[in-house]
Amino acid sequence: MTLALCCMSHSPLLDLTDPGPELTADVESAFASARGFITDYDPELVVVFHPDHYNGFFYELMPPFCVGLAATSIGDYGSEAGPLDVPRDIALGCARAALDAVVDLAVSLRMEVDHGAVQPLEILLGGITKRPVIPFFVNSVAAPFAPIGRVRKLGRAVGGYLASLDRRVLLIGSGGLSREPPVPTLDSAPPEVLEGLIAGRHPTAADRAARQERVIAAAQQFAAGKGNLKPLNPEWDQRFLDQLAANDLDAIDQYTNESIEAEGGNSGHEIRTWVAAYAALTAVGPYEITSRYYRPIPEFIAGFSVTTAIPASAMESTKG
């Protein structure tokens, strides 16, 4: 088996808010199951499709997709900081595969990644340097966005290249599902905030702490049924998960950017990371989801899900 998958919602609030002991234990059980799946698979390489939250990518230059040929974690929200172990030759191969499939993307030799990329590496693998990792930025926050079908095409091209390697590759999609955390937008940001969206790299420790406190306060209000954030949408989340489980990426191709925002919230676009990962898995044929967890968790401002999947051919061989 050359490809396997684990997709998970991330949230900067995982260690900063308390949804109660029952829900905390429930989420940890889902993570433990995913860790067991990954331990059994024992990946030799990890490819993480991730968003960014105006920490590494800004409107001074906002590509729809970018693969890191080298990358460093900035360590926001208490996540692990430092360089990732990126195999540059394979990352470059991913870029070439996408370009050969007529999917335009950027490359970076100084990619900076935030909790969106790092949290799954910490939770699922135990740290950012436990395995060689290729970070694949999929713009999911800063409009305008590529059509969702382009994300699928990107994933399929990258998956085809990864499947040709003689190694076990774990695909991770990090983000979503329905969610609308207090992330400023280009249309609504006041002038002093707008500059941070354009070129806000490396804020001061005080600015970072203030941003964190604003997010925590917003989550507390949201969990109490107050504030003006869009409600979570479990129906939309479950429909998306059902379509993934059915290998029905054609249905997801029909999502429009407007419908994603209307039903899933401004950051519902983070499902793009899942689409990229699942599309990559289809490069070796149909797949089967081996575990599926979902709970709407206001304290995390997220329709929260964890799934694992393997090629159907691998499932058949284990049955045999």
Image: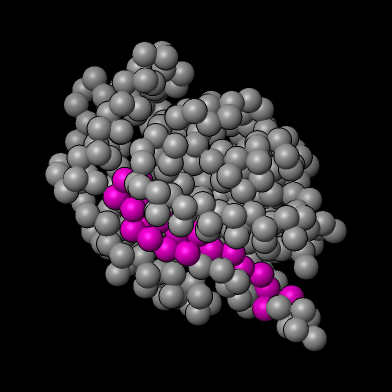
Name the residue rendered at 66%, 70% in the picture.
310
Name the residue rendered at 49%, 28% in the picture.
78
Quarter where residue 163 is shown:
bottom right
Residue occupying the far right of the picture: 166
* Residue 147 seen in render: no
Q: Return the x and y of residue 288 as percentages of the image width and height.
A: 61, 76
Q: Return the x and y of residue 206 as percentages of the image width and height.
A: 36, 13
Model colouring? one colour
Q: Is residue 305 above or below residue 251?
A: above
Q: Which residues are magenta?
A: 293-314
Residue nearest the viewer, comparing 25 with 85: 25
Residue 144 belongs to the span the image colors magenta: no
Residue 305 belongs to the span the image colors magenta: yes
Residue nearest the viewer, comparing 71 with 311: 311
Left or right, residue 291 beside residue 19: right
Quarter where residue 39 is shown:
bottom right
Left or right, residue 171 beside residue 152: right
Q: Return the x and y of residue 102 as percentages of the image width and height.
A: 58, 58
